[in-house]
Each structure stands twice: as structure tokens, then as C-alpha cells.
Image (cartoon, helix red, strand yellow):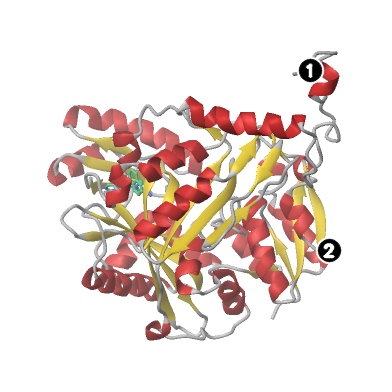
Amino acid sequence: MFKKILIANRGEIAVRVMRTCREMDIQTVAVYSEVDAAAAHVLEADEAVLLGESEPSKSYLNIDRIIDTAEKTGADAIHPGYGFLAENPDFAENCESSGINFIGPPSHVIRDLGNKTLARTIMEKAGVPVIPGMLKATTDTALLCQEAEEMGYPVLVKAVSGGGGKGMRVVSAREEMEEACLSAMNEAKKAFGDGSLYLEKCLESPRHVEFQILADRQGNAVHLFERECSIQRRHQKIIEETPSPAMNPSLRKAMGDAAVSAVLASGYVNAGTVEFLLDRSGRFYFLEVNTRLQVEHPITEMTTGIDLVRQQLEIAAGTPLPFKQQDITRRGHAIECRIYAEDPEAGFFPSPGLVLFHQEPSGPGIRNDCGIYSGFEVPMEYDPILSKLVVTAGTREAARMRMIRALESYVILGIRTTIPFLIDVLKSPEFAKGDTYTDFIERHFDNWSQNMEASNLARIAYIVDELTASTKPSAGLKERGCPTPWETLGEWRM
Ligand code: MV4
């Protein structure tokens, strides 16, 4: 096993990876940018190295600096987390040629699966159902228009190097096709340096169901069941759960088998996710493979009892998987809510800044993977995720009620968060029924605003707490350099 691992990431996911390292007696190296000098992942690590200025290209995306830091600190492996360099084949290749173990799949597999038409071809050959559409990408708009005629509208224009909805356009009629192609091409070129496009038949209001997989270097592969991730906004997931309310045993068996076939066909090694779309009639189609540990991995951990980071490290170190498919069982229901520093009343605009007060929920069946603390200043430079609140309970309804209770007792003051929005989604009759589709938020929560009474209660509680000079362990306002009400109110007292 590795002796020392560099975590090339920040925030909650870097902290998450370090916790497993500590349990396995592996030393950890954090890397950070100027603005992150006091970030949670820096405090959690055994040692920490400054990468450079705060903009991502100078810090968390700086391949040369990160490899150099791994060499200088004597780290024998790098865990990339998610985002940043996690699915960059050049980074993985650079690690390989520097003799540092990249904790993820081989670089050539990341590269193959990052090419969406090549991925579709691999899956079709392996007998995995793919969405009807093209297997070759092009920049020729005339060819794309001709293909669309044959396929019939509506079609989806997608970027071959895409993912996450960038360079993607729904086209419902011939008149819009050429313009959609040109704008998608432009966007894809800017985002991925490659404007090649292909077409798929457009599925209407599908569910997003994905399977967690693990594959070792010896050629064994298993799945750890599904996650339902349909509740999202502009391709950013908000709530995930497992099991999927849409699933039944025969569909689960068919999709699980397809996920394992996808893994074996692509030469995949390490932890990964096979994404599917499930249409209203119950047919499923391969969408893409995510070649990383996903944000929503904890719900799989909480229901299967398997530490996915530990499995990633064991696989990377060459250990064969310790279980076979039939050994993997799961229990109960888990839900994850992503808590962002965003203002849900202002179009989910980022809301970075000083966290005045942070108090996590606790109790049975609650886990909070968190990257902030009272007094931490959330920087504006990065993804504004603050924490991932995960609950488990025996049934979906018990998990839903537990999540509402946990969200209602979660206090984050000083910045706007998505907590009040999440509470209303969890309480909605549509969520309670399990009617979760990819257009759920647009359809039911397009113009949401908060019940003022609830929002003021939290603020009043905080002010009373400060005014009564409580003995809470976090530093008071004054210690943090803010004037207290006693200094600003003059001689006036309630
Ligand atoms: C689709 C689709 C419908 N039909 N492809 C969005 C992100 C990208 N990875 C693929 N996406 C979609 N592809 C076909 N042929 C609908 C989506 C989609 C979606 C997929 C997963 C989760 C949320 C989504 C939200 C809107 C659209």
C-alpha cells in the first residue's frame, strides 16, 4: 500500500479522501492556492504545499506544479478527487510517466471514454443499448442537417468532447438546425478546444440513473447498484438517492449487467460510474462513463457499507477486489442533498463570503461531508459546494423525513445557501411520490422564493445568541474582527 498520497483537490472531497487515508495509516499531502491557506483540507492534511495564485490554472489545474510537489514531498500516488484534473487524460499520463500512481483509470481509458462517439461505438459493440444516433462526429453542418432529416426531430446536437450539457442543443424543427449546430460548435470549441458534433434522438423528460462500478487490475468488475440523479438544475445535480424510485429487480439486473459489460469492454480499472437515461416506457440507454469518484458516492457507501475511496486505493495498489457481485448487498435508503453557497432566490447566483456561524445536524443516520467551518471565508474562485448532507433510513419515506429534519437543524449564517430551497423540494408532493425526472426543477420550482418567517427565525436566533454573549466554542464576532453590537449601539440597550 502507498505510504503517502497527494490529494490534488480542495474542499469537502479532499477532506473525504484524507479521512480514509488516515484510517489506512497513509500520510496525506494537501495542495492549496493563496486564497485557500486556511481551508478545511489544509487543516486536515499531514502536510500542505502552496501551489500558487488562486485562479485554477495557476493552482489546482497546474499539472507541472502538482507533479513537482508530489515528487518533492515523496508522495507515491495522487488522488484527483472530482472536477479539476480528475478526468484529464494528459494529467493521468503525466503521472504515469513520472512513476506516480494516478488513483483512477489508465490515461488511455480516460481518453477513449472522453470521446463520446468512440464511447458509443465501444458500448454498441459490447451489446449495451445506446441512444439511436451517430457514431462519428463531424464539423460539417450540412451533413448534420441531413442526418437530422433521416432521424426525425426532435434531435439533440452534442459535442464529441462534451459532457455536463456544454455544447449541447435540443433541436425540434428543421429551421433551427443550422443555427443550433453553429452555436454548439462555437461553445464546444471554446470549452474543449474541439468543435466536432454528433446527433442523438432526443428522449423526452427521462430519468438519470447511474451505476457505481469497481474494476480491478486482474480483470474483475462488479457494480454497487444504482443512484437516481434526476433532480438537477442546469446540469448541476442537487439531490441524489438510492435505490431509484423507478427501479424494479429485473430492470436493475439488466442495467447492472449492462454497466459491468461497459466496464469490461472499455478496459476500465478503478472506481467509475456508468450513466444511463431511462425513458418513460422503462427502456434504458447508455449515456456516458464518468471516470472518477463522483460527488454523490456517499449514498452508495451508506447503503452498501463499502468505503469507495479505500477500494480505489486498494485497486490502484494492485489488490484484487475482495468481493464478487453476489457478495454485494445493500440495506435501506439513502438521500444526498448538495449544499451550495448560492442564492436560490436570485437564480442560484454564487454567494461566497465569511461563514459567521456553522452548526451541523447530527443524530442517527446522518453524515455530512463538509469543507467549511465557522470563520471560514468561502472563496469565489471555485465551485461553491459547501457540504453534502447524506441521510440513511430503512425506507425512502423515513429517509425523506430524516433529511427534512437534518436540513431544518443545519445552521449556516453569513452567506446564502441552498438549504431552504432543498427543504421545500423534499417537502413537495412530487418528490414524496418519487416523481423525479430531469425536468423536475424547471417544472415545479421555476420561480421559487423563501417563506420569510422561516428565514428570519434563524437570523433572530443568531442575534439573540450573540447578544447574550454565549459561551459557544467558536470565536465570537469580536475575536473575528467584527464589531459587536455593544460597540455599535452606543448607550442604547434593549
Ligand atoms: C440526452 C437527453 C435526452 N436525449 N440525450 C445532459 C447532460 C449530458 N451528459 C447528457 N444530457 C442529456 N442527454 C438524449 N439523447 C437529456 C439530457 C439531459 C440530462 C441528462 C442527465 C441528467 C440531467 C439532464 C438534464 C437535461 C438534459
Q: Is residue 478 visible?
A: yes
Please tell me which of labels 2 and 1 falls first in the chain.
2
Residue of label 1: 493
Q: Residues within 10 Å of mark 2 (few under 14, many from 20)?
A: few
Q: Position of residue 62 (x, y in %)?
A: 70, 49
What secondary structure is found at the residue carrying circle 1? loop
Question: What mark, if any, has residue 410 been given in the picture?
Answer: none
The amino acid type found where label 2 is placed reads Lys
Toward the top, the furthest residue is 491
User: Which residue is depicted at the point 83% across and 65% down?
Assistant: 73
Q: Position of residue 138 (x, y in %)?
A: 33, 45
Question: Ligand 1: does it lie within 8 Å of the C-beta at label 1?
Answer: no
Work out whether 300 lies above or below 39: below
Does residue 288 appear in the picture of this structure? no
Is 46 on the left or on the right of 452, as rendered?
A: right
Q: How many marks?
A: 2
Q: CA distance from mark 2 to mark 1?
A: 58 Å
Residue 367 at what x, y percent from top left? 56, 59
- The residue that appears at 44% across and 74% down in the rendered structure is 267
Q: Is residue 252 left or right of residue 187?
A: left
Quadrant showing the C terminus:
top right
Residue 177, percent across and down?
Answer: 24, 32
Q: Does residue 231 sit above or below 78 in this rendering? A: above
Q: Residue at x 55, y 52 (%)?
A: 388
In the rendered image, which quarter is residue 413 located in?
Answer: top right
Q: Given the image, on which type of amino acid does mark 1 rest?
A: Arg
Circles 2 and 1, Cβ within 8 Å, touching? The answer is no
The residue at label 2 has a CB less than 8 Å from ligand 1? no
Residue bearing mark 2: 72
